[in-house]
Amino acid sequence: MAPKRGARAPPPAPVEKKKAPEKVSNPLFEKRPKQFGIGGALPPKKDLHRFVKWPKYVRIQRQRRILNRRLKVPPALNQFTKTLDKHLAASLFRMLLKYRPEDKAAKKERLLKRAQAEAESKTVETKKPIVVKYGINHVTYLIEEAKAQLVVIAHDVDPIELVVWLPALCRKMGVPYAIVKGKARLGAVVHKKTATALCLTSVKNEDKLEFSKIVEAVKANFNDRFDELRKQWGGGIMGIKSMAKTKAKEKLLAKEAAQRMS
């Protein structure tokens, strides 16, 4: 028989609730919760890394890096992202450090010795030492005169227009060149803060075998691949959110296409 309209359903049977076991507190240890309000306890330390207002030059660096990833980068600039690998760069810098130019203190000492020798009317050796050459104008002159045997260019020169033409000049003159990280590391070789490019014109006889191996590896990585690198565009890498949106849109289009086919 169907239940009458407006009749109330019988209430459900009462369910006995399980009593939670009472926590036994030790009377020796009184619970004193911290109050983090004004004038209260000091709040716990948080990671405020996201809220730091970074200096302007740091923000510009980061924005430039993001733009270089997002926008299309022409091959002339994109070649500076293809740097020498870690192991080969380490052996190259070991070689460069052997031919560091003298610093101010060493130069002062040398000139003092020379002055003393001239005062005592002794013969003074004036043979030029073999050292690393630096300075963009000097390096360019050595390349044009075909005196340079190896050119090392920094990848992070700002503005990049200072060195953007240097790889093409090196290839035209048949000079091996390498792009390395970074300008501060090159500067440390020649006792400067930064250096755009370094150059070796010759090496000692005991280093010729090692130097020839480095030159061969550098030629294989840069000079011989010049035609390939001049066609490679960079950038065009979107962010995570943009990539996720594009992926979702493609998935939806594929689903619609499959429905049409069926």
Image (cartoon, helix red, strand yellow):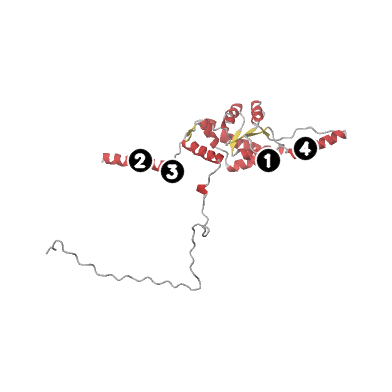
Label 3 crowd (10 A; few <14 / some 14-19 / many >=20): few
Residue receiving disc 3: 240
108 with respect to 70 (left or right): right
Q: Considering the image in quadrants, where does the N terminus appear?
A: bottom left
Label 2 crowd (10 A; few <14 / some 14-19 / many >=20): few
Alpha carbons under labels 4 and 2: distance apart: 69 Å
Alpha carbons under labels 2 and 3: distance apart: 14 Å
Among numbered discs 1 and 4, the one appearing first in the sequence: 1
Among numbered discs 4 and 2, the one appearing first in the sequence: 4
Among numbered discs 3 and 4, the one appearing first in the sequence: 4
Q: Considering the image in quadrants, where does the C terminus appear?
A: top left
Q: Quadrant of residue 212?
A: top right
Most foreground residue, 69 or 205:
69
Label 4 crowd (10 A; few <14 / some 14-19 / many >=20): few
Choose mark 1 or mark 4, whichever is in front: 4
Q: Report whether residue 122 is seen.
A: no
Q: Which mark is residue 108?
A: 4
**Circle 2: residue type:** Lys
**Circle 1: residue type:** Leu
Q: Secondary structure at mark 4?
A: helix
- Estimate the x, y position of residue 101 in percent, counting from the top left: 71, 37
Q: Are marks 3 and 4 in contact (CB under 8 Å)?
A: no
Is 35 situated above or below 189?
below
Residue receiving disc 2: 249
Most foreground residue, 2 or 167:
2
Residue found at the very far left of the displayed protein: 1
Q: Which mark is residue 97?
A: 1
